[in-house]
Image (cartoon, helix red, strand yellow):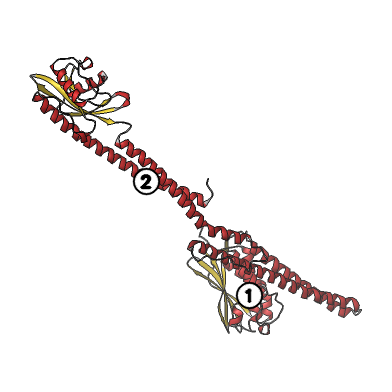
Amino acid sequence: MIRSLRARVVLSLALVTLAVLGAFVAVVFLLFRDRLRSELDDSLKTYATEVIAAVEAGSPIPQPPIEAGQLGAAILSLDGRVIDSTLTFEGELEPEGSGDGSGDGDGESSGEGGSDSGRENEVTELSTVDALLEAAASDGALVDLPGEHGTQLRAFVRQIEADGAPVVVAALAPASSSGSPADRLLVISLIALTSAVLVVVVIAYWVGGLAVRPLHRLATDVHSLDDRSLKRRVDVPGHAAEVAEVAAAVNTLLSRIDQSLQRERAFVADASHELRNPLASLRAELELSSRDADPDRMRLGIQGAIEETDRLARLADDLLLLARADAGNLKIEPISLADVASTAIVRQAKRAAAGGVSLDLMGDDVTALGAPGLVGRAVDNLIENALRYAPDGTPIQVSLWSDGSSVGIDVRDRGSGISPEERERIFDRFARVDQSRARDGGGTGLGLAIVASAMHAMGGSVQLISAEPGNTVFRLTFSRAAES
C-alpha cells in the first residue's frame, strides 16, 4: 500500500488521466474507423456501378479514380474462372492466361487494362474466389474476405448478365493493412496518450511537492517541540488554507497541552503547600506534647495531632479520588438518584443538626447512568459545601429532576451567595471563596473540584445555575438510564 500522500495523488491523477484520455482515444478511433469503412463501402458501390455499366456495354473495366485509393475490380464466371481483373494490391485476382501473355478475348481485354495500369498481378487463394461466388447469390452484397499475408478485403459483389451469360462483378479494396489510416491514427493516439500521462505525472509530482511542503515544515516544527517549549507555536501559512487550518489546530492543541501542564504544575505546588501545613502543625503538636509533662496538656496536644492527621487523610483521599477520576476507566451503570441522595443526607444529618440546618429531599426518583461511588461523593461534597455556608435555621433542599434524556440533582442553600469573581474559579482545585462567610475553614479546597472531575469522568456536568444571596444552586446533570 502506498503511504505517501504525494505518491497517491500522483497515481490517482495518472489513472484518471489514463482512463479519460484512453476512453477519448478509443471513441475517436472507433468513429474514425467506422467513417473510413463507410467511405470505403460507398467507393466500392460507386466503382462497382461503373464496372457493371462497362461490362454491360462491352467496354474494358475502367480504372478506379486516383482519390479512391487501392480499389480494384474482377469479373468471374459462375464456375470460378477469372475473366478480367484490375486489382493492384497483394492478394488480388489474376485473369486466366495472363501469366503467359495469351488468352481469349476476355484475356485480351484484361491485358489491355493491365497494360494501362503498368502493374503486375498475383494469383489469390481459391477461398477468395469461392467467397465471391457465394456472396454473388444476393443482389449487391458487401462482404469481408480473407486476403494474403493476413490482410482483409472488403468487396461489393453482384451477379449480372453479360453477352447472354451470367457473370459475377466484384469491386474489392483492402479493409485493413499495417499502413492504413486507422492504424496510423491508433499509433499516434497511443503515443499522444502515453506522452500526456507522463506530462500529467511530472506536473502532478511537482505540484504535489509544492502542496505538501508546508506540511513537511509543520511536521518539522512539531517534532522540534518538547515540554519546555510548549509556549512556542508553529507558523500558520497564509497561502494554503488547508495547511493553515491544520497548523491552527496544532496551535490550539499546544495551547491546551500547555494549559493542562500549567494546571498540573500548579496542582502539584498547591498539593505540596496543603500537605506542608498540616504536617507542620502535626510536628508542632507532637513536639509540644513531648516537652510537656502535664497529662491534660499532653492529651490536648495528642488530640490536635489526631485532628491534623484526619485532615491529612482527607486531603490524601481527595487527591486519590481526583487522580482516579482523571484516569477514567469507570464502570458506568444505572443508579437510583433517590437512593444516592437519601444516603448522602443520612451521612450529613448529624452535622446539619449541629448547625440547626434541615436537609430536605424533594422530587420523584429518577435513574441515571453513573459510577455509584463518584455520584455519592459528588452529592456529599455539594451538601458539605452548602452546610459550610448555609445560615442557622435555614433549609438545604436536595431536589431530583428529569428533562427528556437528562436527569439530575439540584442542591440549594440560603447562603450569602458567590461573587462574580469567585464564580469563574469555583471549580478550580484548591480554590476557596471568602472564608469569612463559612462556618469553618476546615475544607481542603478540593470539594467542588472533585465534583467537576467526577461528573466529567462520568460524561455528566456540574453547573452553578444560581449564585445570588439566599439562593445558591448547584446542579448535577446525568444521562437518563434506559428503562429495562
Amino acid type of disc 1?
Ile
- Image coordinates of residue 165 in percent, x first then y, are 10, 18
Can the viewer see residue 339 in this picture? Answer: no
- Image coordinates of residue 26 in percent, x first then y, are 33, 41
Tag 2 secondary structure: helix
Amino acid type of disc 2?
Leu
Q: In which quarter of the image is residue 452?
A: bottom right
Q: Nearer the viewer, residue 133 or 460?
A: 133
What residue is drawn where x is 77% and y is 76%? 277
Vertical position of residue 360 compared to residue 460: above or below: below
What residue is drawn where x is 24% and y is 35%? 37
- State left or right for residue 212 relative to residue 257: left
Vertical position of residue 211 compared to residue 376: above or below: above
Q: Residue 383 carries which label?
A: 1
Kindly report which numbered mark, 2 or 1, lies closer to the viewer in this rendering. 2
Read off the residue under disc 2: 21
Vertical position of residue 149 compared to residue 331: above or below: above
- Image coordinates of residue 103 in percent, x first then y, are 17, 15
Q: In which quarter of the image is residue 112?
A: top left
